Image (tube, rainbow, N blue to C red):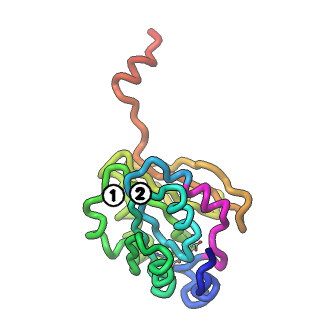
Amino acid sequence: MPMGAGLLQQWLKTPALVGAILPSSQRLAKVMARHASDSDALVELGAGTGTITNELVRQHPAVPLILFEQNSILAGQLHRHFPHAQIVPECFHARTELLAHLPERTVFVSSLPFRSLPAHIAAPTVAVLHRLLTEAPQRRLIQFTYQPRAPFKAPAGLVWRRCVTVWRNAPPAGVWELRMPFRPRKHDSATLRTD
Ligand SMILES: C[S@@+](CC[C@H](N)C(=O)[O-])C[C@H]1O[C@@H](n2cnc3c(N)ncnc32)[C@H](O)[C@@H]1O
């Protein structure tokens, strides 16, 4: 589903915020959406032209969806294409009151270009994600990056896991997950004892 105004047009206006001249590939969108399984709410950060949104809706049709897109032209297009989603045409960190009652199993799916975002946007964005992810151990952030390392330094109490590399994307993209570390329950560790 190609949307009218392309990323290139918007990138020419604000390159550091848009971060890419091409939309995410279908392959990357499918992989990102697959890693967002088992959620009771989905929050997409930087939905852009809606390539990943399409897959989120296709793979998880019954899950409520909130889309953040700071570019008003792209946000308007998202509104027309995804009438059942809640579209927030602002920066993610600026509307935290909308995220006050998210369920325990919320997955955040992000295309935000953390490497190029100005510090006054990147820092509060990471701070909000830190708070939301440490509020509930089942919450996760799924983020892609074109760099060979984690998208940003893991905030205290959270760990990155590299999920997969999507080679059929220009350029190839690493898909990463940020969450609280898995702690085996008492029962699990008892089962593992060998003494
Ligand atoms: C790499 S592009 C979009 C990729 C998207 N998956 C696609 O295929 O179109 C990143 C998007 O994040 C948006 N963005 C950047 N900073 C943002 C922020 N703080 N909050 C919400 N959206 C933001 C940009 O406007 C841009 O549309």
The image shows residue 123, relative to residue 105, as above or below, that is below
Between label 1 and label 2, give the one nearer the viewer. Answer: 2
In this rendering, position of residue 187 left or right of residue 31: left
Is residue 170 or residue 128 the one in the foreground? 170
User: Which is more N-terminal, label 2 or label 1?
Assistant: 2
Expressed as whole percent of the image width and height from the top left, the position of residue 153 reads 49, 58
Distance (Cα) linking label 1 and label 2:
19 Å
User: What amino acid is at disc 2?
Assistant: Val
Is residue 96 or residue 89 the one in the foreground? 89
Give me the residue at 44% from left, 15% from top.
193
Residue carrying label 1? 132
Give me the residue at 72% from left, 68% from top.
170
Res. 117 mark: none
Q: Give the residues in magenta.
A: 20-33
Ligand 1 within 8 angstroms of badge 2 C-beta: no
Membership of 102 in magenta stretch = no
Label 1: few (<14), some or many (≥20) within 10 Å? many
User: What amino acid is at disc 1?
Assistant: Leu
Res. 63 mark: 2
In the rendered image, the residue lying farthest to the top is: 195
In this rendering, position of residue 127 left or right of residue 176: left
Classify the position of the N terminus by image quarter.
Answer: bottom right
In this rendering, position of residue 154 left or right of residue 137: right
Quadrant in the picture for residue 192: top left
Kindly state the secondary structure of the residue where label 2 is placed: loop
Classify the position of the C terminus by image quarter.
Answer: top left
Label 2: few (<14), some or many (≥20) within 10 Å? some
Give me the residue at 38% from left, 46% from top.
138
Expressed as whole percent of the image width and height from the top left, the position of residue 103 reads 31, 53
